[in-house]
Image (cartoon, grey):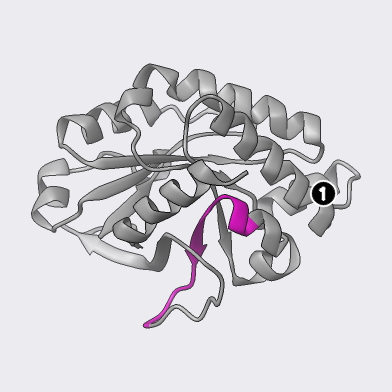
Amino acid sequence: VGIDISKWNGKIDWKAVKKAGVEFVIIRAGYGMNVDYKFKQNIEAAIDNDMLIGCYWFSYSYTYQGAKAEAEKCWRTIKPYKNHINLPVFYDYEYDSTNYARRKGHRDNKKLVSGMAATFCTTLKNKGMQSGIYTNLDYARNYFTEEVLNKYHTWIAVWGNSCVYKGHYVIWQVSENYYINGKRFDKNYLYYDRYLKDISKKSTRK
């Protein structure tokens, strides 16, 4: 069981989180070209509490160059903690990303978004990090190709009692209403053995 967190979660009672049985955390490192101001505090607390740690970066890019710049900014942000990040760094592109692109006069599509995701993930992979894509059923179907989802680790959001996503995934975001001492979090399940097996496969893939 794990949670994903950002500045929106405010002050976190890590003792309560541990007591609830949470074993991993996915921390927002930033968004666009901005660092999440709680990232340093959150990741250092996660390290102190012996969590498995992953990160995510919310994308506002609408070009390959923008995705590359976000990846480089993400890397500079997480680099001091790279030895403690043992889960993937995820590219997060969703509704606010699409809306932002349209306000800027750009139309996104499956080819573009898949290419930006590949650019981001490959950049992080070349830095020695595991990388992946966070998505939901809508975006998995309409904005990401099966090829790009299979090439990197997938974190899928399907809220409910069962995961109806038919593709391969290593993390399932099951709910946005997971309460710990009255504070609400997103609840996630990590399939750790599957993740380790995927690392082995991807490291030997040509």
Disc 1 packing (10 Å; few <14; some 14–19; many ≥20): some
- Residue 122: where, in percent of width, then height? 63, 35
- Residue 58: where, in percent of width, then height? 58, 42
- Residue 73: where, in percent of width, then height? 59, 22
- Residue 16: where, in percent of width, then height? 12, 50
Residue 157 falls inside the magenta stretch = yes
Of residue 142 and residue 33, the one placed in the foreground of this image is 142
**In the figure, 178 relative to 87: above or below?**
below
Report the span colored magenta. 149-161
Residue denoted by label 1: 112
* Quadrant for the N terminus in the image: bottom left
Picture residue at 44% right of the left edge, 24% below the top? 78
* Quadrant for the C terminus in the image: top right
Of residue 38 and residue 45, the one placed in the foreground of this image is 45
**Which kind of residue does numbered mark 1 sit on?**
Leu
Q: Is residue 28 left or right of residue 133?
A: left
Picture residue at 60% right of the left edge, 58% below the top? 150
